[in-house]
Image (tube, grey):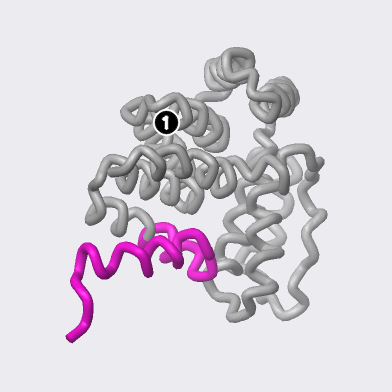
């Protein structure tokens, strides 16, 4: 693959994975997302709400999962964009005040291109809360941009272990495979992302770009 392309991919990954300009500096609290008046209450909804009140981590998890459910079923691109933003916001809340501070500072360092400081803070966040998917995703960006694709893949796989529907992690894996000239694996990863978020523009464009290479052009 041409060097010029490899220089461009990290910028795209920052846009798709990190979303620094869009959500990195936003605050987010459970319950700020607008409720869908047409939503049907799940069985045991009262019990679930009571359990969430006792366990903030469970509340955060339930919120992101509800948003991901809506993301898969909405037919409106505009609504999907709004839901995507809310999902990214929810993923930036770990359930640990200490980890949230480390993440906030790490993202600031990353935005300022202080990779060493950002990596140190993400490492510390992982040590405190290794089951927090988003910190693995953010550290993967650092590895990717440093050309450490094996480490980036491992971090993205860890993110997916803790959040299997992390569409950003799937896009990141697709970009890495595309960068190392493995279009078939890249296409599979992008399609995994689209199965979660059918409106995800970066994955749709990647699928369109790779289909002729992997499956050939229609006769």
Which residue in the rendered view is the most extreme toward the bottom?
219
**Residue 18, image x and y in percent?**
60, 40
68 left or right, relative to 102: left
In the foreground, 60 or 140: 140
Residue displayed at 58% across by 21% down:
122
Q: What is the total number of numbered labels drawn onto the structure image? A: 1
Check the picture and name the quadrant holding the N terminus. top left
Which stretch did the figure color magenta? 191-219
Check the picture and name the quadrant holding the C terminus. bottom left
Residue displayed at 47% across by 30% down:
145
**Residue 103, image x and y in percent?**
67, 27
In the foreground, 64 or 190: 190
| SS at circle 1 | helix
101 left or right, relative to 181: right
In the foreground, 143 or 86: 143
Magenta segment's dominant SS is helix
Residue displayed at 73% across by 40% down:
54
Residue displayed at 32% across by 43% down:
2
- Residue under label 1, please give it: 155
- Residue 59 visible? The answer is no
- Is 21 included in the stretch rendered in magenta? no
- Residue 217 visible? The answer is yes
């Amino acid at each position: 693959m041409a060097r010029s392309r490899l220089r461009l991919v990290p910028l795209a990954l920052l846009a798709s994975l990190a979303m620094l300009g869009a959500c990195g500096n936003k605050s987010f609290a459970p319950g700020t997302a607008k409720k869908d008046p047409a939503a049907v209450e799940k069985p045991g909804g009262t019990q679930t709400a009571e359990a969430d009140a006792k366990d903030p981590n469970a509340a955060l998890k339930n919120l992101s999962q509800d948003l991901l459910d809506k993301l898969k079923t909405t037919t409106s691109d505009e609504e999907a964009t709004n839901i995507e933003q809310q999902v990214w916001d929810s993923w930036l809340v770990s359930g640990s005040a200490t980890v949230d501070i480390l993440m906030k500072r790490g993202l600031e360092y990353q935005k300022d291109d202080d990779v060493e400081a950002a990596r140190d803070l993400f490492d510390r966040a992982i040590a405190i809360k290794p089951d927090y998917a988003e910190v693995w995703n953010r550290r993967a960006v650092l590895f990717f941009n440093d050309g450490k694709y094996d480490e980036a893949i491992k971090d993205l796989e860890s993110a997916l272990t803790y959040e299997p529907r992390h569409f950003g992690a799937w896009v990141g894996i697709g970009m890495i495979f595309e960068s190392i000239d493995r279009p078939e694996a890249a296409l599979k990863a992008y399609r995994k992302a689209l199965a979660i978020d059918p409106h995800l523009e970066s994955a749709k464009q990647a699928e369109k770009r790779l289909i002729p290479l992997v499956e050939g052009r229609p006769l």
